[in-house]
Amino acid sequence: MRDQLAAAPTVLHLRSSGCSFLLESAPGRLPLVRHWGADLGPLDESAARAACLAGAAGGRLPGELDAGPASLVPEPWTGWMGRPGLVGSREGRDWSPAFTVSSVRLGGTEVTGYTESGPATAEITAVDAEARIRLGLNVEMLESGLVRVRGRVENEGAPFALAELSLYLPVPTRATELVDFAGRWGMERQAQRLGFGVGSHVRENRRGRTGLDSAYVLHATEPGSDFARGETWAVHVAWSGNHRHVAERDSTGVALLGGGELLLPGEIRLETGEAYTGPWVYGAYGDGLDRVAHRFHDHLRARPGHVASPRPVTLNTWEAVYFEHDRDRLLELARLAGEIGIERFVLDDGWFGARRDSRAGLGDWTVSEDVWPDGLHPLVDAVHAHGMQFGLWVEPEMVNLDSDLARAHPEWIMAARTELPVEQRSQHVLNLSIPACYDAVLGQLLKVLGEYDIGYLKWDHNRDHVEAGLRPRGGIPSEHAQTRAVYRLLAELRAAHPGLEIESCAAGGGRIDLGIMEVTDRVWVSDVSDPLERQRLMRWTGQLLPPELMGAHVASPRSHTTSRRHDLSFRAASAFFGHFGVEWDLTATTTEERAELAGWIALHRAHRRLLHTGRVWRGPDPAAGIQSHGVVAQDGSEALYAFTSLTWCATGAPPHARLSGLDPRARYRVRPLTVGTPPAGFAAPPWWSERGFDAPGSALGRIGLQVPTLHPEQSVLVHVERLA
């Protein structure tokens, strides 16, 4: 080990919202996280240094390395035998940097000794004079209790090829289980739980978008944890391109969670004076999965640009008309939408260029004269006349070979060789890192937005990036530059049109992360609107996003993707807790169906302020076929809960469902919320009454409510209001 100087380490104790982050920066090495988790309370210097000592690694057995613990960027020179945080070299030299901290700043002021603070940003600068590399680390404790870390590598010598910069946070040895996600199209966010043993659990993504199979949020938990209990530590890499999440435990018991951007070979070559900044890696701690989710929700809601207005009930035309853009039919669809309370009308794919099917037109963002000889003005004007906002579908990062753009500029298509990559959905990826390509796409979009009063863009991304290279320059990798260009493009559009909202859609839920959420306003959770699938999709997408950012629509009685049939009450109840909308051909509905749908829309509009500002609580994974979840107002004044029968009850009667999140000291009135006739198989429990009944919050939270008897794939809603 390197010689340790006698000077006392600099110690930072950052606290917020029930969390503590204790960081020790000792001379001669990078900072060590001595505690990340539950709040330690206010500490004086003596107590803080004692806590650091308590959190230090134990002794070593004979035959083991005299190794130090892993830092935020684990370094091989310390004896750490796991994954290094920084990987790179100068043609095989300077591949094992040994950094020394040169300064620690908190809130812009240099600090030494001991400092305790609330939410704040620490900036740590470290250098390796021999390797001629400078490392900057940002560590933030946010108001929500989230911690986020980010690294910056600056080259001060000959060209340096950077292969990886990943940051890690330690977790206690008692976190012996992992929870993350897998998936595919239509089956996003399949939760998986496995043991956290010795070795690396590495989830790498090379799709050029967050991915339908994304790890999403990687948790390390105590055994048997669930939504309500069990200490849990989680990380999320806020990057919409290639990335990795890692959980690693070595043979001595040291356990880490972390990740960063996944760089393609040769993608980042730093010339003298050049720097690379990685994405934020977020860390969330909580007792149970719900409290981990609350930290992400609180952070997103505290952003200056977070959607503040009531989320408009949205109708999207895709499953109503697909590519068949008949003007009269769409005008009638808009009329019916306005009648039932829809507030935003979104015209989906098929309005531009030669786009009569999925094989042509992408890249030509001009209104098709074939189907819209008078432009979109007749439809836009009708939508506005019916009191709705107009929205439009776009997929600007993609191109069909059968398009004017591809014929004019084939060199703008991403490829690693002369031959084009394998096709997906008859389309390829435009390389937005090429300035002329970027300007052409931006110019087309600004022209459309300038001609029409458009309040919303559904921004799609329907294929993975394969061989993401810069074609004119021999296919050199350009995935990092592409992701940066997409962020910049979205930011420029929003700056030019400040009221514009943008949805992140990527074949459904393929691009959902905290990076894309910096420049968008909601996500399309999945291309599957089947309400049975949506029960799971909404439940687990909520591990990162609050309800108001998750698009959830009432689709056709028979699902276009799964062919299942469901009652309107189940379809509407399953969409109720998200950003509510409709994906149904209203011109094919009956008067009675539209009246019932209008009732659901009115009910959602009456309660959306609660739904989109309250605290989400999820009941345990389905017991006896029943699943429950709810949203409770921040002040505990009211709440909404849903009870859903997923299968036949395994017992003779449905179980009791606890109403989580209520004030146990308060008294509440409980009432069912109903639209139309009762769900199939409904049998009322004793408490079910339109007038409701009164009960203490302690009883509702501990005993719960007897769930009504329901046939499979049916839901009921319950409203709870605190009494004076």
Image: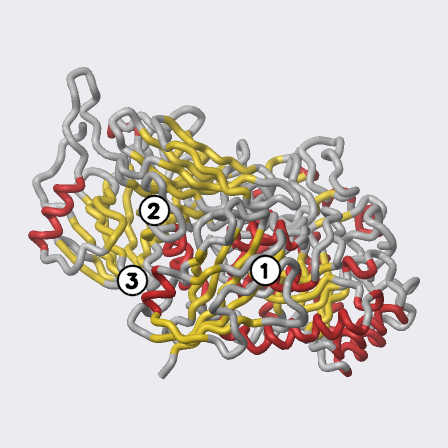
Is the Cβ of the residue at disc 3 closer than 8 Å to that at disc 2?
Answer: no
Residue 151, how many percent across, how many down? Answer: 38, 46
Please name which of the two marks, 2 or 1, marks the residue nearer to the observer: 1
**Which circle marks residue 17 in the picture?**
3
The residue that disc 1 covers is 715
Q: Image quarter for residue 157?
A: top left
Left or right of 212: which side holds 105? left
Mark 3: which amino acid? Ser
Residue at the (63%, 71%) spot, across then down:
500
Is the Cβ of the residue at disc 1 closer than 8 Å to that at disc 3?
Answer: no
Residue 82, how many percent across, how many down? Answer: 34, 28
Please name which of the two marks, 3 or 2, marks the residue nearer to the observer: 2
Residue 404, how many percent across, how many down? Answer: 84, 52
Left or right of 496: which side holds 451? right
Residue 252, how many percent across, how many down? Answer: 25, 27
The residue that disc 2 covers is 232
For marks 2 and 1, the one nearer the N-term is 2
